[in-house]
Image (cartoon, rainbow, N blue to C red):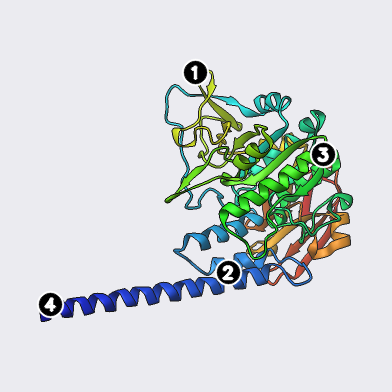
């Protein structure tokens, strides 16, 4: 080896070592951020601070996908921003022969003859839970009696008798629309059950999928009722999915093999929203549901969302309420929350808000169910309560 090559190799080694050091330091810094976020969000007694993760992330930028996914997850809890901005790739329907039909009635007709109905969700998109909520009343009439949730923890043994979730009931269930999905289901008479893998420490992807399938099989075999399942992303894939050099058999694939029952699977995560539709829709081509080639056989349907989904609130019987605030309340680091009054009285900061937003304007419009009485709470950046007021009329809410 020449002296010149030797010097060049040493420089390359030094450069690679420097890059590795920077990557390790960056990973360490981001791990510290995630630890800080997690510890600031939920106290040991279960009290929640929805603002702190936002305030921490708002000051930090990361190039690590995992960190950004977690960032937008916490943002979604306070309904902050566009939840589709993640680095997850979304597909568009480009085929000019495809037509769109509103999904609600189609799915409701199909569900009559099914034993197992599965939706997936993107965990940082609360509107997926909002949409699933609109089906609960019809599904209950069709004989569905169980709502099985991946996000639910096994430890909350009082959920079904209490009739609403609290901070320790699950993971993503602390997001207001997820909590309301559970409230509605319990009020309609559903039994709401967990099925997540209980292994500690967590095992492999394959062992997790097997455990989820086993847990769901036990529920289905022991209960004489139909079941609605809400899972994340590819867990409802009905065929093995290629991942790097392996194939993963997800929960739905394994459950189908175990029970010999074909679940009806509805994907909400793969397609981007589309200005051509004004309601959640199913793409069709030649009278058959249109599914992109890469997702063929994974799901029975893939849904396309409109750019605006406010109509879903109205389908759930909510009213659009005008809220007017004094100028001094307007601060992007202040939070306005609407708790169900009895839940807040009994559980305080362990309760999950019915709705909440950052205060970025002195006027806002919020969808609330007029059949409920709320505890309005306004908090500053330190989570100190600035305003506490009972809300039981919904023509207009004025806070001065």
Secondary structure of the residue carrying numbered label 2: helix
Q: Tell me which numbered mark, 3 or 4, is placed earlier along the sequence.
A: 4
In space, the residues marked 4 and 1 are separated at their CA atoms by 67 Å
Residue 362 or residue 367, whichever sits in front: 367
Q: Is residue 381 in view?
A: no
Q: Name the mark on residue 286.
A: 1
How many badges with numbers are in the image? 4
Q: Tell me which numbered mark, 1 or 3, is placed earlier along the sequence.
A: 3
Which residue is tagged 2? 34
Q: Tell me which numbered mark, 4 or 1, is placed earlier along the sequence.
A: 4
Q: Residue at x 86, y 55 (%)?
A: 158
- Point out the image quarter for the C terminus: bottom right
Q: Tell me which numbered mark, 3 or 2, is placed earlier along the sequence.
A: 2
Which residue is tagged 4? 1
List x then y, in percent, for residue 187: 85, 42
Above or below residue 303? Residue 284 is above
Which residue is tagged 3? 223
List x then y, in percent, for residue 304: 55, 34
> Label 3: few (<14), some or many (≥20) within 10 Å?
few
Q: Tell me which numbered mark, 2 or 4, is placed earlier along the sequence.
A: 4
Mark 2 vs mark 4: give the one in front.
4
List x then y, in percent, for residue 274: 51, 35
Residue 203 or residue 178, whichever sits in front: 203
Q: Quadrant of residue 119?
A: top right
- Point out the image quarter for the N terminus: bottom left
Answer yes or no: do the residues labelled 3 and 2 have beta carbons within 8 Å?
Answer: no
In space, the residues marked 1 and 2 are separated at their CA atoms by 48 Å
In space, the residues marked 3 and 4 are separated at their CA atoms by 74 Å
> Label 4: few (<14), some or many (≥20) within 10 Å?
few
């Amino acid at each position: 080896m020449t002296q010149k090559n030797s010097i060049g190799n040493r420089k390359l080694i030094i450069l690679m070592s420097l890059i590795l050091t920077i990557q390790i330091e960056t990973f360490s810094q981001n791990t510290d951020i995630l630890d800080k976020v997690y510890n600031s969000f939920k106290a040991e007694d279960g009290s929640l601070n929805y603002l702190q993760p936002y305030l921490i992330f708002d000051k930090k930028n990361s190039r690590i996908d995992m960190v950004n996914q977690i960032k937008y997850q916490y943002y979604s809890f306070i309904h902050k921003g566009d939840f589709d901005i993640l680095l997850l790739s979304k597909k568009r329907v480009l085929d000019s022969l495809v037509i769109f039909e509103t999904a609600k009635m189609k799915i409701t007709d199909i569900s009559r003859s099914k034993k197992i109905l599965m939706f997936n969700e993107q965990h940082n998109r609360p509107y997926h839970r909002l949409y699933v909520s609109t089906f609960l009343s019809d599904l209950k009439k069709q004989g569905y009696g169980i709502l099985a949730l991946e996000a639910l923890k096994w430890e909350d043994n009082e959920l079904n008798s209490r009739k609403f979730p609290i901070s320790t009931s699950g993971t993503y269930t602390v997001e207001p629309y997820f909590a309301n999905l559970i409230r509605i289901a319990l009020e309609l008479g559903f039994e709401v059950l967990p099925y997540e893998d209980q292994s500690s420490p967590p095992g492999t992807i394959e062992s997790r999928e097997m455990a989820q399938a086993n847990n769901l099989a036990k529920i289905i075999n022991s209960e004489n009722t139909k079941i609605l399942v809400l899972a994340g992303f590819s867990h409802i894939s009905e065929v093995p999915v290629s991942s790097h050099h392996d194939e993963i058999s997800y929960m739905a694939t394994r459950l189908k093999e175990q029970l010999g029952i074909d679940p009806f699977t509805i994907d909400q995560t793969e397609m981007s929203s589309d200005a051509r539709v004004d309601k959640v829709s199913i793409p069709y081509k030649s009278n058959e549901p249109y599914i992109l080639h890469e997702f063929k056989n994974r799901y029975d349907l893939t849904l396309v969302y409109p750019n605006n989904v406010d109509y879903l609130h109205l389908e759930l019987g909510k009213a659009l309420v005008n809220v007017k605030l004094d100028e001094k309340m307007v601060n992007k680091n202040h939070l306005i929350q609407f708790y169900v009054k009895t839940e807040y009285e009994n559980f305080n900061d362990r309760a999950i808000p019915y709705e909440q937003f950052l205060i970025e304007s002195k006027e806002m419009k919020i969808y609330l169910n007029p059949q409920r009485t709320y505890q309005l709470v306004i908090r500053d950046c330190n989570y100190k309560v600035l305003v506490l007021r009972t809300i039981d009329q919904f023509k207009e809410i004025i806070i001065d």
